[in-house]
Image (cartoon, rainbow, N blue to C red):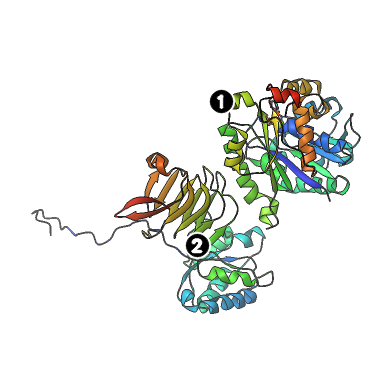
Amino acid sequence: MARIIVVTSGKGGVGKTTTSAAIAMGLAKKGHKTAVIDFDVGLRNLDLIMGCERRVVYDFINVVNGEATLHQALIKDKNCSQLYILPASQTRDKDALSKEGVEKVLEELSKTFKYIVCDSPAGIEKGAHLAMYFADDAFVVTNPEVSSVRDSDRMLGLMSSKSRRAEQNQEPIKEYLLLSRYSPDRVKLGEMLSVEDVQEILSLPLLGVIPESKSVLNASNAGIPIILDEKSDAGQAYADIVARYLGEDKPHRFIEDKKGFFGKLFGGK
Amino acid sequence: MSTDDQTTAYNAPVLEFKSGSFSVPALILSGNDLQLIEQQLQDKIRLAPEFFKNSPVIIDLKELTRQSLNIDIALITEIARKLGLLPIGIRGGTLQQNKEALDLRIPVYSNNSRTTATGTQIATQTTPDVSQKKDAVPTAMVITQPIRSGQRLYAHGDLVILAQVSAGAEILAEGNIHVYGALRGRALAGVQGNTDARIFCTHLQAELISIAGNYKISEDLAKTIYNKPVHIYLKDYTLVIKEL
Ligand SMILES: Nc1ncnc2c1ncn2[C@@H]1O[C@H](COP(=O)(O)OP(=O)(O)OP(=O)(O)O)[C@@H](O)[C@H]1O
Ligand SMILES: [Mg+2]
């Protein structure tokens, strides 16, 4: 049985797609057969960040509607043979997805994949609901600002009441906090919430802090998931996150100002 | 009464319409086997005969409708009456069922009319669940998960929360409220008018607190009690907040 991970946030533009691409690649590179699904119907972003936009023939909606088989629609990643991408449709609207359709696709994927990563659209409407409905684990991507934290809280509430696990009285979805676009200098200036602030408000286990980093934009322009840029701080942050998720004990990094003396000595700790 | 000398007769009003809100138990059906329903209902009533005797009840058909199971309104109301209940309405039924009900002069309530029901659930498809016995009388509702922004929780008795209540969440209880964690949202105790209801919490950061309709908003709360363990009660219609 596959483990279904939803990458969600409520608020838009916080780094869900960046995170989905990075962790899917990270899990695949560790040898786990992984599929990553773009639930953002109508926008189609994931294939750009994964650098496979020119190889899209069929998409998620085609599979849901029976117009293509899963096998036809899945795109094999060019960097990692364990990773497959199921792109969203750019031409349909979000009503094209149904709970039954999504369930069918996830069930079929579950037969052969170890992890299924669902890149949720922003908001709390249908698309975001479907992306989280069948999840086992939730990666809640939050930026260190009040509105993002509040939206994450809202999303957590929905997951605890409107998911399949909640409706069937099963063990709840396992929720993890990913604090993204963090910059210690701005926290120091009081312009951003600190890790402790966010954790106190959300009371969630912290899976990792991803620093604000120019390398993210460069990577996404190049169509390469940031985790493959092993020199970048954001890439390392995602590598840590994948390792922690898989049970490795890694101390948290990127919380303190990296320009400090000790930071330089210990590689950004 | 009237002292004017006009010729038209003046009658003092003998009636008026007022909206009221009453707490009525809902009988939530999840199966349509009449024999099973009768048997399980009888078992439940036996647990608290005084509680159910002549009790008004709303028959909730939402789950049946969801499962496309039909049930005859005349027959189900007859069963309820036979067992001493007084059905005063249905909700969540199909158009056909609504019509049947109205033909029998039984009111039809809208599904989302803010439920005042105490939710006595009857599961007739699965094997009877013994744990449901506790539904018969409202006792404390105990919640161990955080109440998140946008969530709303209503308890017919006391409400005990062993986690945080986020900003933007709302908890309501007809009885007392206890929050063992940060209370950042809105907390309303004694919502059916119980002025003896109280609120207890370990970390007061609430957006609003209210007892029997007497409320204070975050701005009214003194800084000295912020994030403190407190006990809130009503004295002469004003809220008193005491540090614990
Ligand atoms: N750690 C980071 N440092 C700097 N920029 C980042 C970081 N993470 C994401 N970004 C940038 O933020 C923008 C939004 O990222 P992304 O598309 O991943 O967010 P999203 O949550 O998927 O957005 P949407 O809600 O629109 O789907 C992109 O331009 C991305 O390059
Ligand atoms: Mg996105």
Instruction: Decide: is B142 above or below B205.
Output: below
Query: Is B213 drawn above or below residue B120 in the view shown?
Result: above
Which amino acid, by three-letter code, is at mark 2? Ala
Residue B213: percent from left, percent from top: 37, 52
* Badge 1 element: loop
Q: Which mark is residue B117?
A: 2
**Figure label count:** 2
Residue A175 can be seen in this image: yes
Q: Position of residue A263 (x, y in %)?
A: 71, 25
Q: Helix, strand, or loop for circle 2?
A: loop
Instruction: Give the residue at x 76% y 35%.
Output: A20
Read off the chain for label 2. B
Ligand 1 quadrant assignment: top right
What x and y, as percent, mark residue A113? 86, 44
Residue A142 position in % (x across, y down): 64, 35
Name the residue nearer the viewer: A28 or B178.
B178
Q: Residue B43 occupies which quadrant of the picture?
A: bottom right
Three-letter code for the amino acid on which mark 1 is drawn: Glu
| Residue found farthest to the right | A81
